[in-house]
Image (cartoon, grey):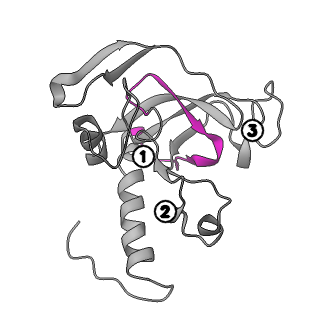
Amino acid sequence: MHAVIFRTHGGPETLEYTEVPTPSPGPGEVLIRVKACSINHLDLWNRQGIPAYRIQLPHISGCDVAGVVEKVGPEVQGLPATMTAGPAGVRVGDRVFIAPGQSCFACEWCQAGQDNRCSSFGVFGAKTPGGYAELTVARASDLIPIPEGVTFEEAAAFPLVFLTAWHMLITRAGLRPGETVLIHAA
């Protein structure tokens, strides 16, 4: 399959369009045919080389991904690999985007709803290979269906920025149901 990778940190000149091995979904994972992947600032920082993410090179960036479920891996919600359905009714052919925040779901922080404090927290496309490729693998639990009328490009435009906004409003500002928020720029 084709992908855009970088082998060294630096500017856009480090990007290389090349052939890479096709990924295969493991237990609890699905294979996604990428239809759209936006450029997030985190993708730029990773390519430039920031200390917060020690990524293995070569690396495929792409934090914000939308596409179509191509294959369901083994042990997705206990289903045999031959079945075509995964968690919450996810099926081969479904239009989905990938929720980029990744945590363990088991530690005290995750259980308290503060998964961004999880010691294993990371972001899809930074902690893992991302969506600058024809195909990518994601945890089935991270898939969100794309609503009718929303294009792949629109769906790929908001996952990580939503996570940032959610963190600011809920975790940092402590916003609660019934409160009012003033948004002075968008």
Magenta span of residues: 130-152
Residue in the image at 44% along x and 83% along y: 174
The 10 Å Cα crowd at callout 2, few under 14, some 14 to 19, many 20 or more, is some
Q: Which numbered disc, 1 or 3, marks the residue that appears first in the sequence?
A: 3
Amino acid bearing label 3:
Val
| Location of residue 105 with respect to 91 vertically, above or below | below
Q: Is residue 139 magenta?
A: yes
Q: Residue 155 bears which disc, if any? A: 1
Residue in the image at 66% along x and 30% along y: 92
Distance from label 2 to label 3 (Cα)? 24 Å
- Residue under label 3, please give it: 76
Q: Nearer the viewer, residue 145 or 59?
A: 59
Where residue 82 sits, quadrant-wise, is: top right
Q: Which numbered disc, 1 or 2, marks the residue that appears first in the sequence?
A: 2
In-image side of 82 versus 132 (left or right): right
CB within 8 Å, label 2 to label 3: no
Task: Point out residue 44 in the picture as x, y percentages from the top left corner.
Answer: 24, 40
Q: Which numbered disc, 2 or 3, marks the residue that appears first in the sequence?
A: 3
The 10 Å Cα crowd at callout 1, few under 14, some 14 to 19, many 20 or more, is many
Where residue 108 sits, quadrant-wise, is: bottom right
Amino acid bearing label 2:
Asn
Q: Secondary structure at mark 1?
A: helix
